[in-house]
Image (cartoon, rainbow, N blue to C red):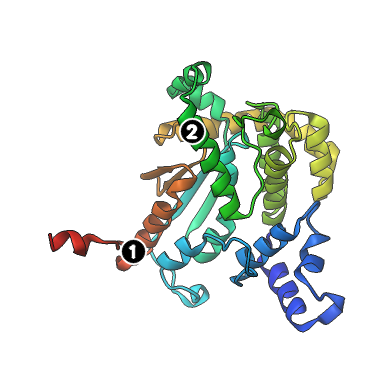
């Protein structure tokens, strides 16, 4: 769904009323299964830079726009310093869904950077370097902390225009189920999607995230994954053959090991030039700043330091 040329083409059609396309709901709604009006408006803002209609959450891509090496003129920039951003992710984390939803904007904003997406098994990371996660799940949570965690997740989801069923919601019917989920087949499927095209990867990945976290479908169920693969347009026989292949298993293991080697301990993890590591959706601002610095924007370091200097 996220092909820049496709979006620009339909953006123009919406603005001009060409080809019978008179609204964003027409342009996007028929293309994205179960696309709500809010999601349609979100796509309008996310992919074209337009401001969503009043009453809907603005896209937080302002992080990236504020720190861009040269906002609005990426195609005119000469190739600068090397900047590779590795994105390690697992579908089993709601915070990863939040962060992942922002990465098309990041790629558009920092077009001189290379983004490499690496599906990895977060359970393997927990087993290797972060077993405390399992102990935490067994313990009785502090009520105030749990309430805040649920509220925080929902506020981030609202800010991004997403619907997320929290794993620890007080009301059972509002929880995602099962949790934790076995995402290994979905992750191998993402590898297959990466081999097809950018569009295929984005559409498959976002549909997996949405199916689980928004719609409560069990992505460990091969029938669910096969239906998503079919929806994206994959040959489902080839898709399932790859998911069961030795190559797919080895690739997930390699990505997981690489994440640990680079200092990762969970999902999502972002690493710039194999040196600067960031963890979590709430670190996208710092990630954006680092990318801008690597690409030569010396003004990326900003804040209220001048007030401190006056004390």
Q: Residue at x 70, y 59 (%)?
A: 38
As helix, strand or loop, the secondary structure at mark 2 comes to loop
Quarter placement of the N terminus? bottom right
Residue 147: image location, x then y, percent:
52, 34
Quarter placement of the C terminus? bottom left
Q: Quickly name the residue at label 2.
A: 266
Q: Which mark is residue 15?
A: none
Q: Residue at x 77, y 78 (%)?
A: 13
Q: Quickly name the residue at label 1.
A: 300
Asked where in the image residue 122 lies, by quadrant, the reply is: top right
Asked where in the image residue 95 lies, by quadrant, the reply is: top right
As helix, strand or loop, the secondary structure at mark 1 comes to helix
Above or below, 285 relative to 16 = above
Measure the alpha-carbon separation of dots 1 and 2: 27 Å
For this view, does 89 lie left or right of residue 247?
Answer: left
Viewer can see residue 92: yes
Q: Residue at x 57, y 28 (%)?
A: 253
Residue 157: image location, x then y, percent:
59, 48
Above or below, 305 relative to 229 = below
Query: Along the polypeptide, which appears first: circle 1 or circle 2?
Result: 2
For this view, does 274 lie left or right of residue 13?
Answer: left
Residue 15: image location, x then y, percent:
73, 80
Seen from the viewer's position, the closer of residues 54 and 18 is: 54
């Amino acid at each position: 769904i996220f092909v820049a040329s496709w979006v620009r083409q339909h953006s123009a059609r919406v603005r001009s009323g060409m080809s019978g396309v008179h609204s964003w709901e027409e342009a996007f709604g028929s293309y994205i299964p179960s696309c709500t009006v809010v999601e349609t408006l979100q796509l309008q803002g996310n992919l074209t830079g337009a401001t969503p209609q009043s009453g809907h959450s603005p896209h937080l891509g302002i992080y990236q726009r504020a720190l861009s090496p040269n906002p609005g003129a990426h195609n005119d920039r000469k190739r600068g310093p090397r900047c590779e951003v590795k994105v390690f992710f697992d579908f089993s984390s709601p915070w990863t869904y939040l962060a992942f939803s922002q990465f098309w904007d990041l790629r558009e904003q920092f077009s001189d950077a290379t983004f490499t997406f690496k599906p990895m098994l977060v359970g393997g990371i927990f087993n290797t370097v972060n077993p405390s996660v399992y102990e935490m799940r067994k313990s009785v949570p502090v009520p105030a902390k749990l309430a805040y965690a649920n509220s925080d997740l929902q506020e981030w989801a609202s800010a991004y225009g997403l619907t997320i069923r929290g794993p620890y919601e007080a009301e059972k019917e509002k929880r995602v189920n099962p949790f934790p989920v076995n995402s290994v087949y979905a992750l191998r499927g993402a590898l297959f999607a990466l081999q097809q095209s950018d569009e295929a990867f984005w559409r498959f990945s976002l549909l997996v995230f949405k199916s689980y976290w928004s719609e409560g479908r069990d992505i460990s169920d091969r029938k669910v994954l096969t239906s998503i693969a079919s929806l994206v347009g994959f040959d489902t026989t080839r898709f399932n053959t790859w998911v069961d292949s030795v190559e797919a298993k080895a690739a997930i293991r390699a990505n997981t090991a690489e994440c640990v080697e680079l200092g990762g301990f969970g999902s999502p993890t972002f690493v710039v030039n194999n040196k600067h590591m960031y963890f979590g959706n709430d670190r996208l601002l710092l990630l954006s700043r680092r990318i801008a610095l690597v690409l030569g924007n010396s003004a990326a370091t900003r804040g209220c330091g001048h007030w401190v200097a006056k004390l």
